[in-house]
Image (spheres, helix red, strand yellow):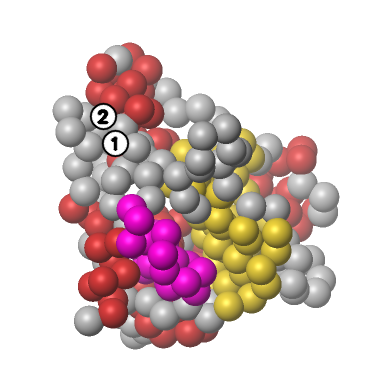
Amino acid sequence: MITMRLGRAIVGLAAAATLALALDPASAADAPDRVLQPDKYTSDKGRALGQKYQAALRDLNTKIYHCMPWLDVKPEGIGFYKPKHLDGDVRYLSLNVNVDQQPAPEFTRLSVQDRVSSMFSRYVPHLLRSMATNDLLKDPNLEGFTVIASWLKAQPASGQQAVMETAAAFVPKALVANFLRGQATVAQLAEGAYVMAWDGETKLGAMKPRAWADDFVLTYKVAGYTPDPKINCN
């Protein structure tokens, strides 16, 4: 099946960052602050959301840092950003991460749409479960959720600069709520999302990924690394 072929093509997670956590438990004590601060927002609506949910966003930052150490949240990568493709002061809770992986040759040979489909399947549904709290789903000032993932496109040749591919999935709040209630499948989540892709700094535009259930995030274990027991990784 095509979904199994694509899913197995994403292999070879890099070990450097995760080994640092495993060998030096003290370094894992505090997650670096990746949350956009309230005074950085450009509207009263954004600022109010940022102030109201600072604790929840810090908890999200901490959970990803301890429970998914192969994901690196970018500076100010968690916040209530306005999707540029939408009009008005529309606010989505955004999570922007780099995926620490070394792409297998079979992954590199896939089409861009197939690579985006694979990464959407692996990360978007799972991260939405961590992002979409009951309070956020009920808040009338929040319209949706955004998951942005960047990954190494291919191993660069000697002396060449590495190129990252990026996919951003913008998912309306009602669709996320239906998904979390079991009323929408992963495939329907992808169908209803607005997905943009980039090749390095080059914007590739909107695309429609296919998607399927992928339990990698729930089953992958970093050798020698145990999350802080005080953190709920479920």
Q: Position of residue 177 (x, y in %)?
A: 44, 75
Specify the quadrant that holds the N terminus: bottom left
Picture quadrant where residue 65 is located: top left
- Pointer 1: residues within 10 angstroms few (<14), some, or many (20+)? few
The answer to whether one can see residue 175 in this image is no
Q: Residue at x 55, y 67 (%)?
A: 169
Would residue 6 be found to the left or right of residue 215 on screen? right
Picture quadrant where residue 218 is located: bottom left
Q: Which mark is residue 228?
A: 2
Q: Residue at x 74, y 72 (%)?
A: 85
Q: Position of residue 219 (x, y in %)?
A: 18, 53
Would residue 166 be found to the left or right of residue 23 on screen? right
- Callouts 1 and 2 close, C-beta under 8 Å: yes
- Chain part drawn in magenta: 104-123
Q: Which residue is mark 1?
A: 231
What amino acid type is highlighted by mark number 2? Asp
